[in-house]
Image (cartoon, grey):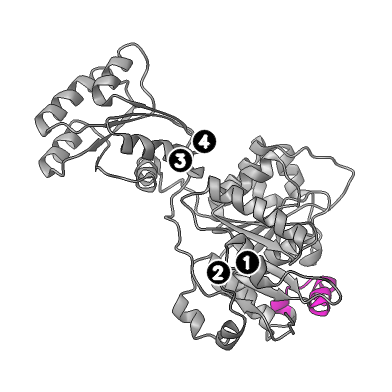
Amino acid sequence: MNTTAQEIDVNSEQQSPSVVIGAIPRISIQAFCVTPEMCDATQRAAIDRRLYKAHVNVQMGGIEKAIEVYKTTPTPNLLIVETNAPRDFVLAELNNLAQVCDAGTKVMVIGHINDVILYRELMNQGVSEYAVAPIGEVQLIEYIANLYGDPENSPVGRTYAFVGAKGGVGSSTISHNIGWAIAETFQEGVVVADFDVPFGTAGLNFNQDPPQGIAEALGAPDRLDAVMLDRLLTKCSEHLSLFASAGSLERQIDVEQNSVEKVIDTLKQSTPSVIIDLPHLWSPWVKHTLVTADEIIITAMPDLANLRNAKSIIDLLRSTRRNDVQPRLIINQVGTPKRPEISPEDFAKSLDLTPTLVLPFEPQIFGQAANNGQMINELRSNTKIAEGFQHLAQIVTNRASVEETKSSLLGPLLKKLRISKE
């Protein structure tokens, strides 16, 4: 495929957005089911990324089994009981259950009758939620999130994790450009968090000299709060800040999963969009950050090693993020002279994933932007690459509709370069 600076493929097909549900806090949940379907749904919900902090136990037996168990053991933070009994029997069972429940335990009842009177009676008895079966895993997670959500303290931000299938494929550059596009286009707060502590390029790409900001936070996560965070961030513009390091090798930081989680949670408390620029390495904290991110963007070049690595990452995410949109795929540096390549069509077909963006090999534009410490939109706002970044920013933030995309200036190119999954 021969590409020029004016040829860039942007996929306008929107994936169905996942239900926007916040992470469940570190609570204990026990469920007592009476039907295999409810048991399966609860077990699937238990392995969803939003419940990774919670401890969930599922067993059969319904309300009667729960009463038997809690005569001798403390009740959890949340007790989920399923019943298919008629109204009067349900009310009697729950009255007996109340006698063994500890103060502070919330009770969610899954019933099989749609009865307003029953619902009112249950609410009067102190039941936290009543849902009518059948309910799926996503619905169950949403119910739990509503029970434990705190509008005043809930995170306001969404996380966008960028990772390269290999080192040097341009994932960091793309993440920085998308962060800039979100901040400037939508005039909302964005933090670009560069987790490559010794070799990160965020400072260079934005022409900034950051302090040991993210290194200091990762080294002492328990001290990180809003005041400390404000001191460690590097302000690039009114809406864009960097959370990076000076790129020094003198200070060695052993990055741990709990530290990264604390940093990201703190950023989400005050920032609408958190761009997570991940280094190309594989460790428990990188895997955990990917799996728990709201959106994942994978950048790859069209060769065999990238294809193998991208497939491994995508297969993992498909198995661990069943209730989320698929990761976004960007194929970068297409048309590099004298380099054997896999065509974008074959690359996409092997992954069973339509790329969101296909970028041509343009070393002059990207090299000049890097040397100047500028984003592509600052340097060449009238190019298709700049337009592609703008479009990607709209897609990942769910601000672009299919109709808007089809009527955009990219319409003719979409028809020419469309990648089919057939």
What is the residue that sits farthest to the right in this orientation?
A: 250
Q: Name the chief secondary structure element in magenta.
A: helix
Question: 10 Å neighbourhood of mark 1: few (<14), some, or many (≥20)?
Answer: many
**Residue under label 1:** 348
Question: 10 Å neighbourhood of mark 3: few (<14), some, or many (≥20)?
Answer: many
Amino acid type, mark 4 = Lys
Height in image: 295 above or below 6?
above
- Of 115 and 416, nearer the camera is 416
Can I make out residue 193 in this image? no
Q: Nearer the viewer, mark 1 or mark 3?
A: 1
The quarter of the rendered structure image containing the N terminus is bottom right
**Residue under label 3:** 24
CB atoms of marks 2 and 1 within 8 Å: yes
Considering only order in the chain, which callout, 3 or 1, is on the residue closer to the N terminus?
3
Label 4's element?
loop
Q: CA distance from mark 4 to mark 2?
A: 36 Å
Amino acid type, mark 3 = Ile
The quarter of the rendered structure image containing the C terminus is bottom right
**Residue under label 2:** 421
Q: Over which residues does the magenta segment extend?
A: 362-378
Q: Is residue 224 part of the magenta span, yes or no?
A: no
Height in image: 58 above or below 417?
above
What is the residue that sits farthest to the front in this orientation?
A: 422
Q: Position of residue 219 (x, y in %)?
A: 74, 38
Considering only order in the chain, which callout, 2 or 4, is on the residue closer to the N terminus?
4
**Residue under label 4:** 53
CB atoms of marks 4 and 1 within 8 Å: no
Q: Position of residue 338 (x, y in %)?
A: 86, 75
CB atoms of marks 4 and 3 within 8 Å: yes
Amino acid type, mark 1 = Ala
